[in-house]
Amino acid sequence: MKRVFALMVCMAMLLSGCAVKQPSIDAPAADSAADSEADVWETLEKAYIYAFPLVLMDATMTSATNTETVIAGKAPVNQFMHGAGTVTAAFKTVVTPNVDTVYTQVWLDLGEEPIIYTMPEADRFFNVQLLDGWTNTVDVLTNPATYAFTYAGWNGELPEGVIRVDFPTQMAWFIARCLLKGEDDLANVKAIQNAMSIMPLSAYVSDGEYTAPQGSYSESNDFVPVNKVLSMSPAEFFAKANELMAKNPPAAEDAAILEQIAAVNVGPDKVFDVSVLTGDIAAQWKEMLTGLRSKLVADGSRFSVKMDQWSYFGRPIGDFGTEYSYRAMIALGGLGANTLDVAMYTKTDTDASGSQMSGAHTYKIHFNTLPPVLDNGFWSVTAYGSDDFLIDNPLNRYCINDRSEFVLNADGTLDIIVSASAPESTSNWLPVNEDNFHLYMRIYSPDMTAIETWEAPVITIID
């Protein structure tokens, strides 16, 4: 591109009658070397963006399974990690936490044999999102049944009635979300969790009695996954990426980018050699990583969808195809994104005038009609501080949702009051503090047809 631009400048100067000083005989070779170096780093950046979600998934799995037994927030491979309830303002582990559902997670290794999961009946929103090693959603389970999670290509026999779910990768992530209707409802959620079962196929076809094996712990694997990945050197990152691609094959549609990044020895059958890089490798690697987030956000903005004052990330979120920058951006911001038909996460930090919302004012969120959802769907509006965490308040109330005891207006509309100080009636009050804040409106099992014409709530200052 640099050489094309220079040629265009020269042509313009010649056409204008200006003389152009001839370059020295050494200049073309110097330019060629510089362009070649730039091309290598451009290809390396493409390779990094492509492989980042896979490497981050592996780091997250390594961290989450780094335990001998099931403990809070961790469980060995192929074992349940049950959430104990929803979070409060004291929770500072993950930003913008969800206070609607209780999670159960399993990090799956499907390399040896299929894993059998039994999904129980539930009287509420309850689904299981299944993600492959590249962060794409393979399936979302909603019906009670017994399922076999299999690595694609496995050709064994399954017991009658067991539903096969194929994964394109050996590494996979199971995320179950179960609606919690209130703290007094926690026992009912625990009953659903306890009714689940998971075990290898070999145990399932024997006598069904199964005791999960003990896991293992290593102090070196106590890390924050995203920090671990971002701290890797080029050699460490791409060696890990190539190793992972052997067990978690790229999709057929990735053929074009695999051909490009093969030039820097990245791919399932490649051995990365840092000698493909030139110049000050450490400095250029740091520069690439420093600018990466802004590049991903800028590219990802193409997928941001406006919904009046609110916005959300649209398709192909959760099933990314060849949108590699989008996939990397979502992975960097938080793994486990749902597809739109499962959940919409709409956000705003401004009121109707476009001003940043702050606890210095009182706001009204006005719904002409409530969010349209399918059977067992639900919605909520949650407030977060400028630090992206829940806001401490005297009611320990962090959201207003369809289970809240709010009071509708006489015409059937709904007004939620958002303020730092309590209004006269607190039934519709969403507390914040004096600082800046933003809101997430979550819509689970949205009615996508109705959403197209639905009028999103308007936020106005009333004091």
Image: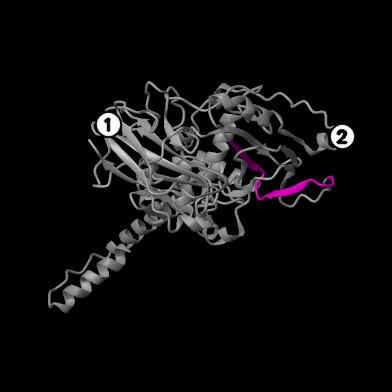
Left/right of residue 37 with respect to residue 86 in the rendered view: left
Residue 376 vs residue 46, the one in the foreground: 376
Q: Residue 452: percent from the left, percent from the top?
A: 45, 58
Left/right of residue 187 with respect to residue 406 in the rendered view: right
**What is the quadrant of residue 427 in the picture?**
top left
Q: Residue 237: percent from the left, percent from the top?
A: 51, 41
The amino acid on which the numbered mark 1 sits, given as a three-letter code, is: Gly
Name the residue carrying label 1. 359
Residue 79 vs residue 25, the one in the foreground: 79
Left/right of residue 462 with respect to residue 439 in the rendered view: left
Over which residues does the magenta segment extend?
A: 159-178
Q: Is residue 250 above or below residue 219?
A: below
Indicate which disc residue 171 carries: none
Screen quadrant of the N terminus: bottom left
Q: Is residue 184 above or below residue 198?
A: above
Indicate which disc residue 206 carries: 2
Q: Residue 191: percent from the left, percent from the top?
A: 67, 28
Residue 288 vs residue 92, the one in the foreground: 92
For mark 2, give the secondary structure.
loop
Q: Is residue 160 magenta?
A: yes
